[in-house]
Image: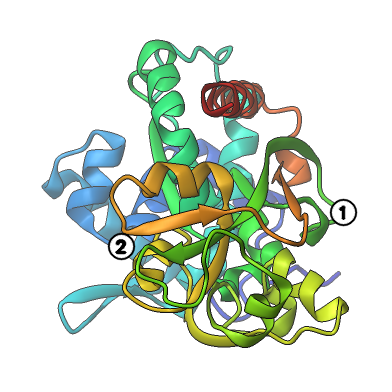
Amino acid sequence: MSKEPSARGAGEGYGPEPFLQVLRSQDLVTLPVLRALLIERSVTRAGETVGLSQPATSAVLARLRRRFGDQLLVRVGRQYELTPLAASLLSRLETATEALERLFGDEFDPGTTTRRFTLAVSDYVVAVMSEELNRILATEAPRATLDIQQLTAAAHLDADTLIRHADGVVLPHELVQGYPGQPLLEDRWVGIVANSNTVVGTELTLEHLATLPWVSPLSRMDPGSATEPLRRLRSLGIDPQIEVTTDSFVSVPFLVAGSNRIAFLHERLAHRLTPIVAVRVLPSPVDVSVALSLRWHHRLTEDPGHLWFRGVLQRAAQQAMSAAD
């Protein structure tokens, strides 16, 4: 009978007997350290994450290198990079760690948890939700940590990878299908022009949208990644003249100020930024709304900690929308 190959070395099996040897040798205790090393790519930061000193973490890394027959972390310039084997281990480690926590862990307690929650979002979501989210986390889970990953145009095109490696991804509802999700934020798009704009007066027209240069977020990689207003205008036969592209929604008003460019931006974010940027908010001649959903991987659906975190995000979003209305 053939044995399933393992990451430990070419041709070496990893059937039931070696698995029992791992359990008996208590190598399971090294999994959190291995995970921290592969995520942080730093012995010092990994040690801080799991509560070990740098020498103790280095000793565990040396032990893991012997066990896997691989360096796992190699220095490239001034930083450490993952070896191909280490990169292949990381996604499996996430699944294994979550399974072990559910199997052996105590009932989830937000008041004492030190869990790190990873959230992939645009800077729009950060700008409109962070204040409320910070308050809830500080009150209910003061020792939990949050890892915010910035969404880019490229990330929008590869949402599947994001969902596999994060606790949650916040994207327009229609962009991701096939994963569990829940509605999170609703907003609408408004026009943005500079206070000094010499063409647009008190009203933004379809002619302005067709003839003036644009600042557009998330349209650099592919037309399919463009925002909904651009797709709606193209469906009306208007091909916007995009002069500046950016992965940041927050940067849009700054790229409009002092020019005759125009842009569309989420209304809540626009009103937060107009007090500090020399731009005006105008109604759009095309009514376009946006609905954002939180999506996550199926394996997390029944996880108690993740269930709590989803509730926290929902409450933070509701508070943010109520405060802005």
Mark 2 burial class by Cα count in 10 Å: few <14, some 14-19, many 20+: some
| Upstream in sequence: badge 1 or badge 2 | 2
- Give the answer, above or below, for where 136 lies relative to 100: above
Q: Position of residue 214 (x, y in %)?
A: 54, 79
Q: Which residue is mark 1?
A: 178
Mark 1–mark 2 distance (CA, rounded to whole Å): 32 Å
- Which numbered dot is residue 41? 2
Q: Position of residue 42 (x, y in %)?
A: 24, 59
| Element type at mark 1 | loop
In the rendered view, does 112 fall on the left or right side of 102? left
- Give the answer, above or below, for where 47 lies relative to 72: above
- Give the answer, above or below, for where 159 lies relative to 52: below
Q: Position of residue 230 (x, y in %)?
A: 71, 73
Does residue 215 show up? yes
| Depth check, front residue: 197 or 295 | 197
Q: In terms of image quadrants, where is residue 71? A: bottom left
Q: Position of residue 60 (x, y in %)?
A: 28, 51
In the rendered view, does 134 fall on the left or right side of 308? left
Q: Nearer the viewer, mark 1 or mark 2?
A: 1
| Depth check, front residue: 36 or 14 | 36
- Give the answer, above or below, for where 302 lies relative to 292: above
- The residue that appears at 74% across and 68% down in the rendered structure is 4
Q: Quadrant of the N terminus?
A: bottom right
Amino acid under disc 1: Gly
Mark 1 burial class by Cα count in 10 Å: few <14, some 14-19, many 20+: few
- The residue that appears at 48% across and 70% down in the rendered structure is 247
- The residue that appears at 44% across and 56% down in the rendered structure is 280
